Image: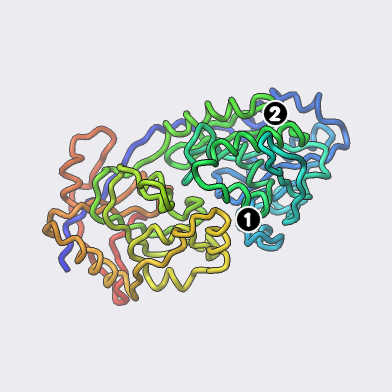
Amino acid sequence: MRFPKMYRLRQQFQRPVASNIQSAINQELALLRLGETVMSGDKIGITVGSRGIQNLTPILRACVDFIRAIGAFPYLVSAMGSHGGGEEEGQRSVLYSLGVTEANLGAPVVTCAECRAIGNTVSGLPVYILESALGLDGILVINRVKSHTSLRGDLESGLVKMLVVGLGGPRGAQQFHGFGQAELPRLLTEIGEVILNRLPIVGGIAVVENAYEETALIRGVSRTDMIDKERELLLYSKSLMPSLPTDQIDLLIIQEMGKNFSGTGMDTNIIGRLRIQGLSEPENPCVKRIAVLDLSKQSHGNATGIGMADFVTQRLVEKVDWQATYLNCLTTTFVGRAAMPMRFNTEKELLDAAIMTLYGASSSELRIVIIPNTLFLGECIVSETVRADLLGKQGMQFDKNPEEFTFDDEERLLLRVP
């Protein structure tokens, strides 16, 4: 098959950056007056999820040091729902890959998969919490606030979800997701309010990242106004989100998918696909075909979201841990996201097949975009038709010389985003 000429593109997004992580954490925790509410000798749990938050270890280390400085004992408490296979050892493996170890951060790492109901919501729903969180004198909630890949509401991915799904453990996560996407915004607030009232939450540290996955803002949030403040931070986070350079794409080539890039392997907000039964797909962006070339090592075999692709390589499939993938999709109930797309032995075979299905346009007119993953979109490669549409647009910088689709001896694509 013939391929169009391609051009390297650098996109410029808003780029606020928190300049000093340690100073920002100390300042925000001081504003929460933890020195007045936390007693000397208290056991304080610091929540840690499975997401690859930028500057995670410096943030955690600063929190550990602050807690210890006021005379309390810090613990790093795993709060990742059913991730890590819903087992203690799996959780520890995920945390280890993120640099979360006692040797690295100076505090014990606590994993747990056993849950207990601590009460009921106003509608009678039991509220589950990990046993590891119930023996603590206080809990400091830490998470990144950003758009969720399935949930649409005034609370999405953030501190409250860390409480409801993260500290809810495998059982809490399964119950929450079992109600279906339409009910999740209501349940997040309903369950979150019970947890905030029943557990000794001493506050939270909300992290907002910019489009370059740099720490843009660190904000301390008190227990009493956690829900309201998170709503404000979510709006700010959405204003900083990256995006594809165009909404109309014939073929989107994603070099890697994985849980370290998005909870769904590929961010649904970026690719414009949900694959949730009963819900309409987003109108924009409109991507006709999605080809994924590989699964990241940091995903530990979890290929949740593979079902949103149209074409994948055999190399990717051979890296999949189907048990972890199925558990993740069964827990969320979005089972279509684990479906198997068409797979091909080589990247050239895959791309030939993908372009063959786009018979409505000549090769020179095809709108193709290559991205490294759905998290880092500052650099990408676009076909000449896309480039023509974007010339002169603010924040778009193109290389002058076009490049060709070329392949190595194993038919791997050489045209890649670094």
Res. 223 mark: 2
User: What element does badge 2 sit on?
Assistant: loop
The crowd level at tag 1 (other Cα within 10 Å; few <14, some 14-19, many 20+) is: many
User: What element does badge 1 sit on?
Assistant: loop
Name the amino acid type tagged 2.
Arg
Q: Which residue corresponds to the image point at 47% horizontal and 46% vertical from the top-left? A: 149
Colour scheme in use: rainbow
Rendered image quadrant of residue 407: bottom left
Task: Residue 307 in the image: state x and y as whole percent.
Answer: 41, 61
Q: Which residue corresponds to the image point at 66% horizontal and 59% vertical from the top-left? A: 86
The crowd level at tag 2 (other Cα within 10 Å; few <14, some 14-19, many 20+) is: some
For the residue pair 177 and 12, the one nearer the viewer reads as 177
For the residue pair 418 and 133, the one nearer the viewer reads as 133
Rendered image quadrant of residue 350: bottom left
Task: Residue 239 in the image: state x and y as whole percent.
Answer: 42, 31
The quadrant of the rendering that contains the C terminus is bottom left
Q: Is residue 172 above or below residue 64?
A: below
C-alpha distance separating marks 1 and 2: 25 Å
For the residue pair 173 and 88, the one nearer the viewer reads as 173
Mark 1 and mark 2 lie on one chain; the one further toward the N terminus is 1
**Position of residue 223 in the picture relative to residue 354 (left or right):** right
Q: Is residue 70 above or below residue 9?
A: above
Res. 400 mark: none
Task: Residue 341 in the image: state x and y as whole percent.
Answer: 37, 66
Res. 82 mark: 1
Name the amino acid type tagged 1.
Ser
Q: Which residue corresponds to the image point at 46% horizontal and 73% vertical from the top-left? A: 318
Task: Residue 400 in the image: state x and y as whole percent.
Answer: 18, 47
